[in-house]
């Protein structure tokens, strides 16, 4: 891979998320393009949230300066923080501030990129961050390159977990991941079958096992019964230093995991990288 994007919020970037971006870029010996989303849609982001973001940037909100000027200074400070974060991790980088037509701009950048690393801290943010969550959903659904939800911190990788249900999307995601990270062939992988409505035929499991064995030194399968998505969550939540690989973002993909019944688990779910790809 030669073109890797990292998307975060210019008003409150997650500097620690650069740890995983550095892991990927150093692995591929490539430059990181940091896309920082500006405060273009101020009407949709509560003023109290913007003021808090300015304060978090080490500034004091005052009444003797235009508010827009203070927002701009906040973003400029945060761009510098991102650049400093890349430099201290020895990652070659460039930064782009996106302030208008955010979704369209990001999707255009992704069209001509190999991978998009998406800061999970704003992808599924707290109350007051709904506008960014909506943008994140649009990007996940429409990006024309693989997307990785980047965790708040990253301490290494010991295992890769494939969400496998024999669907074209799940197989495609596994192939995309394998092509993107050939240097991870020494990591143990497990294909988790979590399809409560239809069991994966044995012949397909054998085909998948045969293909995985061509690329990975250690492969295994794990069957989950009953509720597919809840079972998948329960399986991965107790694990450390893993990376999750999933297919189609949509009605039956990752979006099913973020329904109201699973909302309280999302914070833990994105505590490690989640690779998402769709046909």
Image (cartoon, helix red, strand yellow):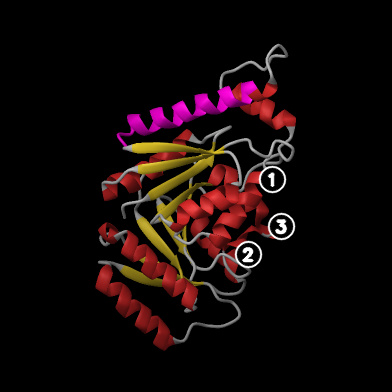
Residue closer to the observer: 237 or 128:
128
Magenta region includes residue 73? yes
Question: Residue 225 location, x and y as percent?
Answer: 56, 74
Residue closer to the observer: 219 or 109:
109
Q: Is residue 240 left or right of residue 184?
A: right
Where is residue 255, by image quadrant? bottom right
Q: Residue at x 53, y 68 (%)?
A: 248
Label 2 environment density (alpha carbons within 10 Å; few <14, some 14–19, many ≥20): some
Q: Furthest residue to the top?
A: 64
Start-end of magenta stretch? 69-91
Q: Is residue 123 left or right of residue 114?
A: right
Contact check, label 3 and label 1, Cβ < 8 Å: no
In the rendered image, which residue does mark 1 sit on? 130
Residue 164 in view here = no
Name the secondary structure under disc 1.
helix
Image vertical order of residue 210 relative to residue 62, above or below: below
Image vertical order of residue 224 relative to residue 275, above or below: below
In the rendered image, which residue does mark 3 sit on? 260
Name the secondary structure under disc 2.
helix
Q: Disc 3 or 1, which lies upstream in sequence?
A: 1
Question: Residue 178 location, x and y as percent?
Answer: 33, 65
């Amino acid at each position: 891979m030669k073109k890797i994007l990292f998307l975060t919020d210019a008003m409150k970037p997650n500097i620690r998320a650069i740890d995983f971006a550095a892991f990927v870029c150093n692995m591929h010996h490539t430059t990181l393009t940091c896309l920082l989303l500006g405060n273009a849609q101020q009407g949709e982001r509560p003023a109290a949230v913007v003021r808090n973001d300015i304060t978090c940037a080490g500034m004091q909100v005052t009444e003797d300066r235009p508010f827009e000027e203070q927002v701009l200074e906040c973003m400029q400070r945060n761009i510098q923080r991102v650049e400093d974060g890349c430099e201290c991790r020895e990652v070659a980088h460039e930064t782009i501030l996106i302030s208008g037509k955010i979704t369209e701009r990001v999707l255009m950048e992704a069209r001509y990129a190999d991978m998009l690393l998406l800061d999970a801290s704003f992808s599924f943010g707290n109350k007051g961050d709904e506008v960014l969550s909506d943008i994140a959903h649009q990007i996940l659904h429409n990006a024309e390159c693989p997307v990785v939800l980047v965790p708040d911190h990253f301490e290494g990788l010991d295992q890769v977990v494939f969400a496998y249900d024999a669907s074209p999307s799940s197989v495609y995601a596994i192939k995309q991941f394998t092509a993107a990270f050939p240097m991870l062939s020494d990591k143990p992988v497990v294909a988790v079958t979590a399809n409560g409505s239809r069991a994966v035929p044995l012949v397909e499991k054998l085909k998948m096992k045969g293909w995985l064995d061509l690329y990975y030194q250690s492969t295994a399968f794990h069957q989950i019964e009953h509720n597919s998505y809840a079972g998948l969550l329960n399986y991965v939540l107790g694990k450390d230093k893993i990376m999750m690989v999933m297919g189609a973002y949509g009605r039956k993909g990752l979006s099913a995991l973020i329904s109201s019944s699973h909302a309280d688990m999302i914070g833990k779910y994105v505590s490690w990288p989640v690779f998402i790809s769709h046909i």
